[in-house]
Image (tube, rainbow, N blue to C red):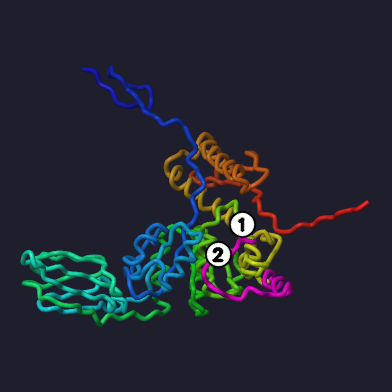
């Protein structure tokens, strides 16, 4: 009897074909994509108590279904601002109230979500002359968003805006508005719930668009804990919160509505890109006229500020709130482009180790050499896109730690920043 299978060592007894299929060796460590922003906003329509992932395509095609408003609505300006640069938004709707309802004969209609937007929904029922069926129309702001034909209430199914219940025949109706929809209250506990839910998601930047100092402090503490204790390198954008003095917190100076654009721009910026001198292309109008002394003061205070430059409004300098420079943490840590390189390094190396090495590769010379090769490949990728400079394999030292499973890596890298100042001496003969 011939046998076979795979082999670990050359110790088979029975005759047969033992064949291993092995992928050609290739680097596992790649640079993770950026572009994901998280935010919690008050709205009067949409999924409650859950993080919803929205792409730019989703937003453009399904804004009415997701948010209860058309893409061009003034209500959705924050999302249009963020999607100028962000690829994806992790969105949490703040506030849970009551659903709107209406009773039309034996039919009960209930809005799909709570909120006052449900009060703008109208149901019209019209009998069809050709048979005993009826057409049930769902309107929002007098725009038909759904129509369905049914002969009795039991046949009708819910749509993206309302659900139906009841039994029996339909009654013709020229149009009945739903009512009773209410918005929930927004308080600190709502933001705490958002932060608890978002912690398990993967994102680059999180924003808070309010002015409550206690809530800003909550976001600051959340950011510091994730960065310093959990090793999750996120960035938080707040308005007028320079006191954070921390590389993970950005304080927008001009106007609080700009946190949406800044959050999206920071999330969408690649690790080899800077936002310094980037043109603001959003919809908000705000003051950007400052004197040179005011702009210098903003930089010294660690404020992310926009300035007026001839016909455009631009980002003055891509910086965070960190200003307490020391020999251990110099001014490089105030540069967001450099922080993006360092954060990506921390996040990517952790992902590579956790996914491919932790509990899977032996901690011997061969195993550590394999891991070192992965790190060399990763940093070569960073150098290839000009995110770091002057890297060589000798900059990585890897060894076994005190415990048998411990791996110690000592590394030196030189992040690259964009040009932002020119010093030129011109001698005329």
Please say whether residue 273 is one of the residues in the magenta stretch: no
Q: Specify the label residue 274 is tagged with.
A: 1
Q: In this figure, which residue is indicated by the disc labeled 2?
A: 281
N-terminal-most mark, 2 or 1? 1
Q: Secondary structure at mark 1?
A: loop
Considering depth in this image, is 225 or 86 the residue closer to the camera?
A: 86
Q: Quadrant of residue 303?
A: bottom right
Work out which residue is located at the far right of the displayed protein and give it.
429
Bounds of the magenta segment: 277-300
**Compared to 409, does 224 lie above or below?**
below
Q: Is residue 364 left or right of residue 130?
A: right
Q: Do callouts 2 and 1 mark residues in contact (Cβ within 8 Å)? A: no
**Compared to 427, does 144 lie above or below?**
below
Q: Is residue 404 left or right of residue 290?
A: left
| Principal secondary structure, stretch drawn in magenta | loop
**Quadrant location, the N terminus:** top left
Considering depth in this image, is 18 or 236 the residue closer to the camera?
A: 236
Which residue is at a point 60% across and 51% down the rendered structure image?
272
- The span from disc 2 to disc 1 (Cα, nearest Å) is 16 Å
Q: Secondary structure at mark 2?
A: loop
Work out which residue is located at the far front of the displayed protein and give it.
129
Which residue is at a point 65% across and 42% down the rendered structure image?
391
Residue 184 point in image, percent of width and height: 34, 79
Which residue is at a point 53% across and 68% down the rendered structure image?
237
Residue 160 point in image, percent of width and height: 26, 65
Q: Quadrant of residue 127?
A: bottom left
Which residue is at a point 24% across and 18% down the rendered structure image?
2
Residue 179 point in image, percent of width and height: 24, 81
């Amino acid at each position: 009897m011939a046998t076979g299978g795979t082999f670990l060592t050359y110790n088979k007894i029975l005759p047969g074909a033992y064949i291993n299929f092995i992928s050609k060796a290739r680097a596992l460590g790649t640079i993770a994509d950026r572009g994901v922003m998280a935010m919690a906003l008050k709205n009067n329509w949409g999924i409650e108590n859950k993080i919803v992932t929205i792409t730019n395509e989703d937003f453009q095609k399904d804004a009415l279904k997701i948010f209860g408003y058309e893409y061009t609505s003034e209500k959705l300006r924050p999302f249009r601002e963020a999607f100028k640069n962000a690829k994806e938004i992790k969105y949490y709707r703040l506030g849970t109230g009551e659903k709107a309802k209406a009773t039309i004969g034996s039919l009960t209609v209930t809005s799909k979500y709570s909120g006052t937007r449900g009060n703008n929904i109208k149901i019209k029922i019209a009998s069809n002359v050709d048979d005993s069926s009826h057409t049930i129309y769902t309107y929002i702001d007098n725009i038909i968003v759904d129509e369905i034909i049914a002969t009795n209430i039991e046949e009708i199914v819910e749509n993206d805006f309302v659900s139906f219940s009841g039994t029996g025949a339909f009654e013709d109706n020229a149009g009945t508005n739903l009512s009773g929809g209410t918005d929930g209250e927004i308080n600190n506990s709502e933001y705490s719930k958002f932060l608890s839910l978002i912690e398990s998601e993967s994102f680059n930047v999180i924003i808070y668009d309010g002015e409550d100092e206690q809530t800003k402090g909550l976001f600051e503490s959340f950011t510091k804990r994730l960065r310093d204790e959990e090793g999750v390198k996120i960035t938080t954008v707040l308005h007028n919160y320079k006191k954070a003095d921390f590389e993970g917190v950005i304080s927008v100076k001009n106007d609080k509505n700009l946190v949406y654009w800044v959050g999206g721009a920071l999330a969408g910026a690649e690790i080899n890109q800077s936002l310094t001198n980037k043109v603001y292309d959003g919809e908000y109008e705000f003051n950007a006229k400052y004197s040179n002394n005011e702009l210098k003061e903003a930089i010294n205070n660690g404020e992310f500020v926009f300035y007026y430059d001839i016909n455009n409004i631009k980002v003055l300098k891509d910086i965070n709130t960190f200003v307490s420079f020391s020999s251990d943490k110099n001014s490089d840590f105030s540069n967001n482009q450099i922080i993006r390189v360092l954060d990506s390094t921390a996040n990517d190396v952790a992902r590579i180790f956790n996914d491919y090495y932790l509990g899977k590769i032996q901690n011997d010379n061969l195993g550590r050499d394999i891991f070192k090769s992965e790190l060399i490949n990763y940093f070569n990728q960073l150098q290839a896109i000009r995110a770091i400079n002057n890297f060589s394999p000798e900059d990585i030292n890897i060894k076994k730690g005190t415990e048998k499973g411990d791996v110690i890596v000592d590394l030196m890298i030189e992040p690259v920043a964009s040009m932002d100042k020119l010093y030129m001496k011109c001698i005329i003969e």
